[in-house]
Image (tube, rainbow, N blue to C red):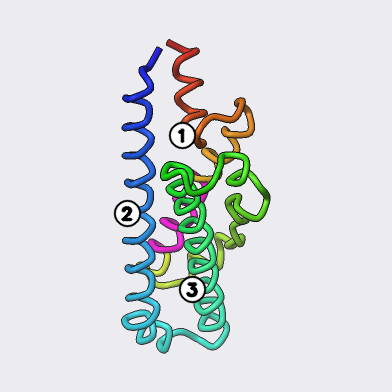
Amino acid sequence: MLCAAFRSQFQSRLIDSLYAEAMLLAESARGYFDEAGRDERGTLDPIARVAFSCESLKVTTRLMHVIAWVLTQRAVEAGEISWSQAREPVRRLGASPESEDAVVASLPTRARMLIHASLDLHRRLDRLDQMADEEPPSTSPVGALHARLDRAF
């Protein structure tokens, strides 16, 4: 069985890593959609410009949900809120707006990369969030993952 200190250290590092990834992606998205993306959007036909704007909002929404979820996990780790409070629907990972493959494929390369990265990060956190429902409450979704690892090994 994994010792509690290792579990806590692993959990903390995972949450910190996810937080850093989310913040870097958010900064990249903001920089792109506010600056270089505006120039690229201007070269698109009117329908594609609308799609570009919609996708930029979807990326922003996904990342806001991701950052809120990670901050909730950090609050649990810090003892600021309880695990049961973190599992309340309002604090769960918000749904990701859907992006149509054909629409995304029509956008500039960097926009596509940011869209796919935001989708990937959201899907990974959604798996962690859902895994937490499969386990008895521990300290966080990462704790639930540890419990599954303990049983497997």
Q: Which mark is residue 20?
A: 2
User: Could you tell me how far apart the alpha carbons at marks 2 and 3 are, in whole angstroms?
Assistant: 20 Å
Q: How many marks?
A: 3
Provide the major secondary structure of the magenta segment: helix
Vertical placement of 9 versus 75: above or below? above
- Residue 2, given in percent of the width and then of the height, sits at 37, 17
**Which label's residue is closer to the chain start, 3 or 1?**
3
Q: Is residue 103 above or below residue 67?
A: below
**Magenta segment:** 113-124
* Residue 22 is one of the magenta-drawn residues: no
- In the image, residue 145 sits, relative to residue 89, either above or below, namely above
The amino acid type found where label 3 is placed reads Ser
Mark 3 neighbour density, 10 Å: few (under 14) some (14–19) many (20 or more): many
Residue ID for mark 1: 142
* Residue 63 image offset from top left, x and y in percent: 47, 62
Mark 3 touching mark 1, by CB under 8 A? no
Q: Quadrant of the C terminus?
A: top left
Residue nearest the observer in this picture, 152 or 86: 86
